[in-house]
Image: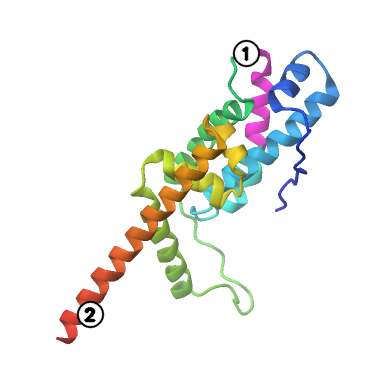
Amino acid sequence: MTEVQVPHTQDRVELRDLAALAGSGDPRALNDLLTRVRAVAHRYVRSRLWTYPGGADMVDDVAQEVCVAVFGALGRYRDEGRPFEAFVYGIAARKVADAQRAFAVADVSTPDLPDGADESPTPEEHAVRHSEVQHIVGLLERLPEKLREILRLRVVAGMSAEETGRALGMTPGAVRVAQHRALNTLRGFVGHEAKVERGAGEERHG
């Protein structure tokens, strides 16, 4: 699975300007718009599905669904002063929610037995990894939703403060402040857990 890479330049056309050109029938603008939308969608979808078993394999498909939905909605899009990234983000969030619901109701199939030696992670290794992921997710779930989204976009998706701000309707400075607050809160959670574990250990050996 490969991620679409889009060069970051200071003077490139804003997405909402491209959207206006694409909506008026400019084929080059439409191609540029969908290329950049897919890059944004890919990173966001990956940040939301990476904790699901097999979620990484669905990222390309869901990101493509976002592009199709954006293309279909261009005729209805009206520039009301908000960044076009926020419009894409809203569509991507709905597509991710659909994928997450599909995970929740999907049947768990039994894999075929391998012919040769199985070099994949053992059940114990899978359990450890799953436990670590669930621990991280659990910590994130203790944050307010806005802070969770900022960390997903900034840390997991790798978006810049400017990109995250356009998606969430915030200034880059506000994104950086909120990210700093979220990380400090997470450190506090981890520190508290470590303190509790030390206390429990001392009681067992006391």
Task: Give the mark nearer the N terminus: 1 vs 2.
Answer: 1
Q: Is residue 121 visible?
A: yes
Rendered location of residue 126, percent (x, y): 47, 69
Q: Amino acid at mark 1?
A: Arg
Q: CA distance from mark 1 to mark 2?
A: 60 Å
Quarter the C terminus occupies = bottom left
Rendered location of residue 192, percent (x, y): 28, 64
Q: Which residue is mark 1?
A: 78
Q: Is residue 72 located in the magenta-colored stretch of the structure?
A: yes
Q: Residue placed at 60% from the left, 72% from the top? A: 114
Q: Is residue 183 above or below residue 92?
A: below
Q: Main secondary structure of the magenta part?
A: helix
Rendered location of residue 101, percent (x, y): 45, 39
Q: Quadrant of residue 25?
A: top right
Q: Is residue 158 located in the magenta-colored stretch of the structure?
A: no
Q: Is residue 123 above or below residue 188?
A: below
Does 29 sit left or right of 91 as displayed? right
Rendered location of residue 97, percent (x, y): 48, 37
Comparing 18 with 71, the one in front is 18
Comparing 109 with 41, the one in front is 41
Q: Which mark is residue 7?
A: none
Q: Amino acid at mark 2?
A: Gly
Which element carries disc 1, helix, strand or loop?
Answer: loop
Q: Is residue 46 above or below residue 88?
A: below
Q: Residue placed at 75% from the left, 23% from the top? A: 18
Does 26 sit left or right of 99 as displayed? right
Q: Which residue is mark 2?
A: 201
Q: Residue placed at 78% from the left, 25% from the top? A: 30
Comparing 21 with 68, the one in front is 21
Q: Which residues are magenta?
A: 64-77
Pointer 1: residues within 10 angstroms few (<14), some, or many (20+)?
A: few
